[in-house]
Amino acid sequence: MTISAHLGAWVAPHPSELPDLRIQMCEQVLQPPHSREFMMRVVGGSSPLIPTISGPPEETAGIDIMGGMLMARSEQRRLRQAQLYWVDEDMTSLALAAAATPSHEPVRARRMPAEAGLMLFAHPIGSHDVDLAAALTSPWTTAAPDLDEELRLTFPVVGVSWSRWSPADLDLDGAPGRIRWTPRTPQGAAPLTPEFDGVWLTFWTTGSKGWDSLPLDRPLAIDNHSGGTLTAVDLVARETLAGFARLQTYDELVLRFDQPLPRPDPDNGSQWAHVVYTAWQLMGQTGNAQLTERKPCPVHVTASNATGEPTSSGPAPCSWFECTPATGPRRKPAPRTRQPRTVAARRNGPAAGRSAPTGATPASTPAPTPTADANTRSESCPPTSKGLPTSPWSRRTGCTSGTHRLHRNRDVPRPPEPSNVCPLQVSESMMRKPFPYSLDDDTAAETYVREALRRSQRGNWPALLADDRAVQTYRVLRRIESGAVQTRVHHREAIKQAEADRDADLISAAQYAEKYREYGQWRERSVVFDAVLRQYLDMAVDQVRAIRRDAVAESLRQVLLTLAVAVEEHRDAHSGEESLADTALWARLRLLPWPTATGAERRVLADAVATERARRGPARRASEDPIQFEGLPVFGETVDVVDLLLDVTDHTRPTCNRTELAELWKQRTPDLLDSAAAQVTAARQKGSYPTHRLRRALLFLEGLDLISRVSDEGGAEVVVTDRTRLVELRRRWDEQQFGLDDLAP
């Protein structure tokens, strides 16, 4: 069992908090236990560089510790010089989607938005699982003997700092070149020369270990000093008393300029580096493909002389990046009536005895059940600074922090819904029953819909989304969503007030830990409720749109699919030599939602394109109508072989093994194995019938100089010699044989 400690619990600081956060990071990086993290990675073999030094044994014995301290000192210098960047959820989603297609561009210095920088993400760009027993083993604690071996902690990667780097940056004072640094690579260790030029990346994770996400009453560790047993509550209280840092270093990576990015292996720095480099590329776009806009923004930096930071609080040069909106049709929700609501004024949360806003729950009451107004994004572990950060997702948030703020347009699909939310299944046993409320009684309807959100009552949704009730159900779901937002605000204010009371010594650290434990329990339930509510709200939107029979919307779906198929064909034609604009364009296929007329499943454009292309394959092979291409008739089966070749090759890898190609063709054409012709071929011992058909198609394409077949020691291969004409052949056949007007909604 993997316990996700705080992968979903990260709340990025508000952009205005980044200067102060940078100062805290500069102060902490040379202090235990943070500096010890660098040493442990060097000693444990996970550091990207291995330090070596020549000399007597008494000098070389402590090289690992010395190397870790040099890395920590270099990190402090990097943070002091860093430009600040803040990336919101939408921009992070775009970078993750674009990085899913690994960049073939060598690492370029001009891609760095600054020589040194610190970038925080509103949503994690990756994560790494750690064995719980290993996380609990330290000079102060030992893992409990009966600890579940399958329990693990998940550490999210939420930030990165970087700077231009050479081995001289890690030299000993007064002894340049004394220490030699050797990078770890898949090909082995190779010493760095003094002329090495590249960029150093340090990845940051949350400062809390995430104990509050583990079973609260289960013994986890033994205190080495007292011998007592420690539970998750005890560990949370210890972290609170110690005042843990908001962020801590997790991994490092060194990239050499003018060399390709490393292969993106899962859950390590090589994968996260692709996301960071893609974000740099998107920030540097210009012209028509530009996704971000640079605006001036005042900066106010306050720092003490002890940290080496500027002490001036006046404005300094700064930029605020925001993404230019995407053009095109947007999903328009059904109109709704806003009900006026009076909210009592309050400061730092509702006071005792004062009525809270509708939908809010006083801090002293138990946390609401999943069907209450619980709707929130996941929160982080208790912050050390006074007050929780303002929501980084607000459109009205201004930038007065000296940070570079990045955000993309808001039309981004949500994460996959949880598996415990079942799609609607209508059976004959679900008989229509009269509703206990009328079509104009939204108050009674809200009570009924809240009950229908429970797992045991979800069989009522076919009736709730029927033609005569869908509009009212949509209206009520919007009211529930509005009330849930108020509840979220209340809970955030309550924990903020509790933190202020702790700092003012009005409550003890143990009391604050208990309040935060209750807050964490509510947060976990609210995330599930939010997912359920969002799914049924989307279903209601689609049902209302279907009832209105919006012909314009349906025609726009067909136009959108045509455009998406064209983008996919463009990707096939230029895969391996794509430009930055191509990468951003292809990423939108994974981000832009595909509007569905019915059903609960939420899809993106890439899913619609995959469905359409899967539909075309059997249709090509079944067609007996050829097209004319360069004066020769071309049948659909040959075009399907072209489609397979374009899938398994690109500009950087234009060859494919002929045996592997034959296996893929057999998987693609199972109907040929059961045909009468296949039985005749087998009886005559002429080999495989699908392979025979593939050979004929390849011979035809070779005659058009579109491919060539070669053989060497490695075996027989097929080489794509003219990819552009192959794409043109497939496009021309599809245009003549397929129309998008017959697609099912």
Image (spheres, grey):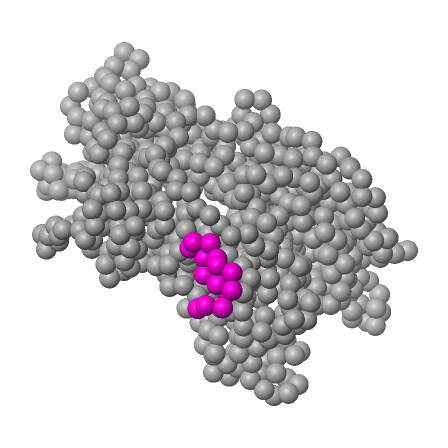
Q: Residue at x 13, y 42 (%)?
A: 674
Q: Is residue 234 magenta?
A: no
Magenta-colored segment: predominant secondary structure: loop
State whether residue 467 is above or below residue 493.
above
Q: On the picture, is 461 further left or further right than 332?
A: left
Q: Position of residue 199 (x, y in %)?
A: 69, 44
Write the start and end of the magenta stretch as one range: 353-366
Q: Is residue 362 magenta?
A: yes
As drawn, 651 above or below 212: above
Farthest residue toward the bottom? 227
Q: Residue at x 42, y 55 (%)?
A: 359
Q: Where is residue 428 shown, x and y percent of the image?
A: 9, 52
- Does residue 259 appear anywhere in the picture? no
Direction from residue 212 to residue 416 in the image, left or right: left
Residue drawn 61% across and 83% down? 223
Which quarter of the rendering shows the N terminus? bottom left
Q: Residue 541, can we see it?
A: yes
Q: Which sits in the foreground, 356 or 505?
A: 356
Q: Give the left or right position of residue 182, taking residue 622 as reference.
A: right
Q: Which image quadrant: the C terminus?
A: top left
Nearer to us in this view, 488 or 166: 488
Q: Position of residue 459 (x, y in %)?
A: 20, 55
Give the camera-side residue of 657 and 323.
Answer: 323
